[in-house]
Image: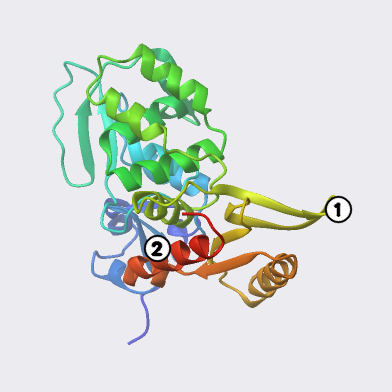
Amino acid sequence: MGAPKIPEQLLGRPFTLAQARAAGLTGRALQGGQWRRVLRGVWAHVDVSDSRELRLAAVLLVLPPDAVARELTAAWLYGADVRRADDLDVHIYVPAGRRMRSRDGLVVSVAQLSDADIFVYRGLRVTSGVRTVFDCLRLADETEALVAADALLHLQCTRLDDVTDYISRTHRVRNSQLALTRLRLAEPKTESPMETRLRLLLLRAGLPPPQAQWVVRENGRFVARLDFAWPSVCVAIEYDGAEHWGQRRHDDRRRAAARALGWHIDVVSAEDYYRTPDEIVDMVRRALAGRGLR
């Protein structure tokens, strides 16, 4: 039996289960390889690539009119890749006095937001960049909070000084002090979630803080940019996220050029991080100690 016919009206955009059924598809058909779940209760055809426009359109399908997308959902809408595969709910704020409970696909919290806390883009209400960083830092798991904060700061959705100032003005909000403590660990130069996770792994192990995105030069000429470096001893560690051969070859060449100038560079992967994190820490500690930095 062949794959179900794809209704033309469902191509190129996200849709709900009700819209799928109206187009002749069943919930069971949506479990096939032609479709992927964008949010809980929202699907798209596999040929529809992820984009900010897709994310906005998907959330608009489930967001109540007076609600505001918040926390990791808001960070995701700003373009950060922060969501976990086991959390496809839309996290929202509703105004005080609004009687709405969390339900399948929606996680509801009550908040009294100022106009400055809300950003409206193409009809979608989302917490401002600074409020989103603040909420992630005070409410999410520490690692995921800093993944979101680093990503939003790197995307220039807000600045460190703006977040610090915001926290000082909202010190009565729950966990605001926790947000400030965590903010001290944020690094706007970080370019990917795995880089944030790797940096936090090293810091929690008590290793000296590295410099992010360190540029290696020879006689003023650019040689390489390294994910994390301890320049005083010419030691660096890189996360290898290359997914295609061309990028990998480029990475190999720039690392070889830096090593030719005396740099010690270790490279780790996502598999290393999740399976043998202690080995990463030991490897970096030995490299630093071997060059006199403890």
Look at mark 1 in the image and give the residue it sits on: 219
- Residue 270: image location, x then y, percent: 42, 67
Q: Between residues 101 and 244, which one lies in front from this camera angle?
A: 244
Left-right relation of 51 to 131: right
Q: Amino acid at mark 1?
A: Asn
**Label 2: which secondary element:** helix
Above or below residue 183? Residue 58 is below
**Residue located at (29% from left, 32% from top):** 138
Is residue 70 in view? no
Query: Residue at left 55%, top 50%?
Result: 191
How far across and how far down the image is residue 131, in percent? 39, 25
Q: Is residue 279 above or below residue 135?
A: below
Q: Which residue is mark 2?
A: 281
Q: Is disc 2 in contact with disc 1, using a CB cutoff of under 8 Å?
A: no
In front here: 122 or 73?
A: 73
What's the residue type where badge 2 is placed?
A: Val
Residue 119 shows which numbered tag?
none
Counting other residues with Cα less than 10 Å from the Cα at mark 1, is it few (<14), some (14-19), or many (20 or more)?
Answer: few
Q: Residue at x 46, y 29 (%)?
A: 129
User: Residue placed at 41% from the left, 22% from the top?
Assistant: 118
In this rendering, does residue 24 appear at all? Answer: yes
Q: Nearer the viewer, residue 155 or 199?
A: 199
Name which of mark 2 and mark 1 comes first in the sequence: 1
- Above or below, comparing residue 131 to residue 79 in the picture: above
Snapshot quadrant of residue 17: bottom left
Tell me the quadrant of the picture where the N terminus can be found: bottom left
Cα gap from disc 2 to disc 1, whole angstroms:
32 Å
